[in-house]
Amino acid sequence: MIMISEQAQEHFAKLLSKQAAGTNIRVFVVNPGTAQAECGVSYCPPDAVEEADLTLNFNGFNAVVDSESKPFLIDAEIDFVTDQMGSQLTLKAPNAKVRKVSDNASLMERVQYVIDSEINPQLANHGGRVSVMELTPEGVAVLQFGGGCNGCAQVDLTLKEGIEKELLNRFVGELTAVKDVTEHERGEHSYY
């Protein structure tokens, strides 16, 4: 579920050796499943571990995850990197903002997951977003743009060279094309 590198495990063990006996670390997500999701790590005294928590055993310590954060921390990675700029603990949780869907989920759910987890975060840099409106029997993903993408001069390039290429590569044999049904109106909200 959560991968903690050997360097990070050593770092946590060192930090925890200075804490009260039995102290764990807690890995959590605040506002899971939203664009405002934030991941964190904190100390977790033994009396703060709840029955519904998941406890993961590592070298010299346990990592505790609350039940609400658990599905959003699948495939999370914690590392401790030292370079010429100093040391830094990094936590990457690709599913923090969007709950991961299973491989046998419907095509609509899998396409929307890729859009929410990989495409929309990039579009959000320009105040934009995209949603799947429908999947036709012919395998066409019908999308609607919003926010800064609505009326943007680059929307066709974004659709054809970015989103369509990514979705067709990901869903070979399932998707045949991507179509935009947005009635683009240029305005102050538009990125370009």
Image (cartoon, rainbow, N blue to C red):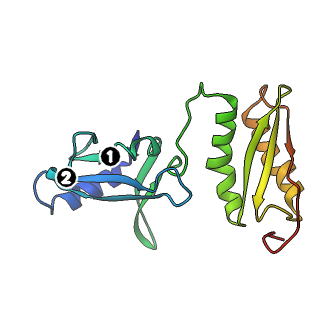
Mark 2 and mark 1 lie on one chain; the one further toward the N terminus is 2
- Please tell me which residue is depicted at 27% across the width and 56% down the height of the picture: 12
Q: Residue at x 72, y 36 (%)?
A: 170
Examine the rendered structure and indicate whether residue 43 appears above or below residue 33. below
Q: Where is residue 73 in the image (x, y as percent from the top left)?
A: 44, 45
Is 98 placed left or right of 175 in the picture? left
Q: Nearer the viewer, residue 81 or 61?
A: 61
* Badge 2 vs badge 1, beta-carbon distance below 8 Å: no
Q: Where is residue 28 in the image (x, y as percent from the top left)?
A: 37, 53
Q: Mark 2 points at which residue?
A: 48
Vertical placement of 8 versus 167: above or below?
below
How far is disc 2 from disc 1 in space, using C-alphas? 11 Å
Residue at the (45%, 74%) spot, across then down: 85
Look at the picture and state if 109 lies above or below 46: above
User: What amino acid is labelled 2 in the image?
Assistant: Ala
Image quarter (top left, top right, bottom left or bottom right) of the C terminus: bottom right
Structural crowding at the residue carrying mark 2, measured as other residues with C-alpha within 10 Å and reported as few (<14), some (14–19) or many (≥20): few
Which labelled disc corresponds to residue 22? Answer: none
Residue 65 tag number: 1
153 to the left or right of 42: right
State the residue at coordinates (44%, 41%): 71
| Callout 1: SS | strand
Amino acid type at image mark 1: Val
Q: Residue 148 sits in which quadrant?
A: bottom right
